[in-house]
Image (cartoon, rainbow, N blue to C red):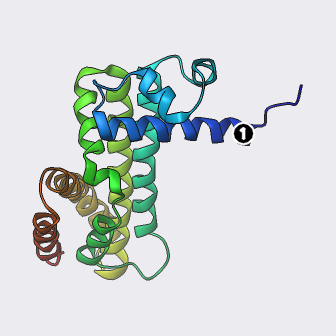
């Protein structure tokens, strides 16, 4: 029997996560059953249960993957010497939001986090990491582009990072619950607000 590689295992986990996210987007978390995910993935129950103990375990892993993608996008804001101003960087970050922001999956993750400890832990860790990465971006902006002293740049970044992340979360709410026109006006407001930094 051929050995299953790590790459194959990761590919299978991703296939199952993608199927789960498609079902969650279509039906919501609570209305999605493991049978729905099985059908969507085209896999057998045995194949899925090799990778996940159940729906809660799968949901937490899918949420982790979805949130990690956004953390990676924030990391890119602080890379290199040519750091964009917050008004431009955060607007680009918002425009780069994947389709699941529009379908409300992020809101569903947050809603499920209220009820399910494993998802709450994933969401809380992701928000902490996202806030930390946003603070790093803002620190570099204040230090390199605004001429702040190191301690002052850190203090400003730590103070503002949770609020900037909150602006991004607000965008997800607006985009999920309204038409794109409203989302565009929200981005214009974020741009105007952050231009003062």
* Tally of numbered discs: 1
Element carrying mark 1: helix
124 and 2: which is toward the camera: 2
Q: Quadrant of the C terminus?
A: bottom left
35 and 20: which is toward the camera: 35
Position of residue 124 measured from the top left corner of the image (x, y, whole percent): 32, 35
Q: Is residue 108 left or right of residue 65?
A: left
Residue bearing the label numbered 1: 8
Mark 1 neighbour class, 10 Å CA radius: few under 14, some 14 to 19, many 20 or more: few
Residue at image coords 27%, 61%: 157
54 and 32: which is toward the camera: 32
* Res 136 → quadrant: bottom left
Q: Is residue 17 above or below residue 76?
A: above
* Res 21 → quadrant: top left
Q: Is residue 152 left or right of residue 125?
A: left
Residue at image coords 29%, 33%: 27
Q: Is residue 75 above or below residue 88?
A: above
Q: Is residue 50 above or below residue 137?
A: above
Residue at image coords 10%, 70%: 185
Q: Is residue 17 left or right of residue 115?
A: right
Q: Quadrant of the N terminus?
A: top right
Q: Is residue 80 left or right of residue 196?
A: right
Residue at image coords 47%, 43%: 65
* Res 142 → quadrant: bottom left
Position of residue 17 measured from the top left corner of the image (x, y, whole percent): 49, 37
Position of residue 56 measured from the top left corner of the image (x, y, whole percent): 41, 21
Position of residue 18 measured from the top left corner of the image (x, y, whole percent): 48, 41
């Amino acid at each position: 029997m051929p050995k299953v590689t790590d790459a194959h295992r990761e590919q299978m986990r991703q296939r199952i996560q993608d199927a789960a996210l498609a079902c969650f987007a279509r039906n919501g978390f609570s209305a999605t059953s493991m049978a729905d995910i099985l059908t969507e993935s085209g896999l057998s129950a045995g194949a899925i249960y090799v990778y996940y103990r159940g729906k809660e375990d799968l949901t937490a892993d899918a949420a982790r993957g979805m949130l990690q993608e956004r953390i990676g996008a924030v990391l890119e804001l602080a890379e290199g010497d040519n750091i964009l101003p917050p008004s431009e960087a955060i607007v680009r970050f918002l425009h780069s939001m994947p389709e699941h922001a529009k379908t409300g999956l992020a809101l569903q993750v947050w809603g499920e986090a209220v009820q399910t400890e494993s998802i709450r832990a994933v969401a809380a860790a992701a928000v902490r990491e996202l806030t930390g990465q946003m603070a790093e971006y803002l620190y570099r902006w204040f230090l390199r582009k605004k001429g702040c002293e190191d301690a002052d740049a850190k203090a400003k970044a730590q103070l503002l990072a949770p609020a900037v992340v909150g602006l991004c979360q607000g965008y997800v709410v607006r985009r999920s619950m309204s038409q794109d026109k409203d989302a565009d006006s929200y981005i214009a407001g974020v741009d105007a607000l952050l231009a003062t930094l």
